[in-house]
Amino acid sequence: QVQLVESGGGLVQAGGSLRLSCTVSGSISSILVMGWYRQAPGNQRELVARISVGGSTNYGDSVKGRFTASRDNAKNTVYLQMNSLKPEDTAVYYCNTYPVNLEWGQGTQVTVSS
């Protein structure tokens, strides 16, 4: 059973940066698209970024220009570099396939203070 483990979250001031990692307990080289999702309290989980096996990326409008997704297929890991963080980025961040096809991991909490 493939497991997803997210890490790298924390508390940061507005304007700061964080780098999230998602390690998959199996090979991701056969997973065409991986996605980063987030869920803020009271909100539905939303897709913020996705990255193809070849490295092509796509971002939600709210994070475009600030977040960068990457992946290392050899390490079975995907990353999300988050810059210029805003309080509205506060959420639990998750990775999964796109579309979602795996059991969700525990996520990693990102809190941005104003």
Image (cartoon, rainbow, N blue to C red):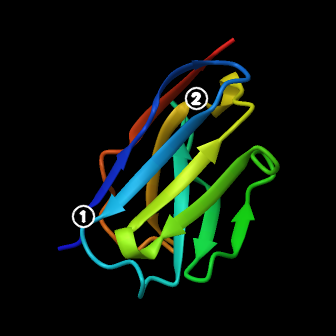
Label drawn at residue 105 = none
Q: Amino acid at mark 1?
A: Gln
Task: Name the side, left or right, on which 73 lies relative to 16.
Answer: left
Q: Quadrant of the N terminus?
A: bottom left
Judge left or right: residue 83 versus residue 109.
Answer: right
Q: Quadrant of the C terminus?
A: top right
Query: Which residue is outermost to the left?
Result: 1
Query: Which SS class for mark 2?
Result: loop
Q: Secondary structure at mark 1?
A: loop
- Which percent across, then down, holds residue 65? 82, 49
Spot the residue most to the top.
114
Comparing 5 with 41, the one in front is 5
Q: Residues within 10 Å of mark 2 (few under 14, many from 20)?
A: many
Residue underneath mark 1: 3
Relative height, residue 66 to residue 87 (above, below): below
Q: Looking at the image, is 9 positioned above or below residue 80?
A: above
- Left or right of 29 on screen, residue 86: right
**How many residues crowd mark 1 within 10 Å: few (<14), some (14–19), many (20+)?**
some
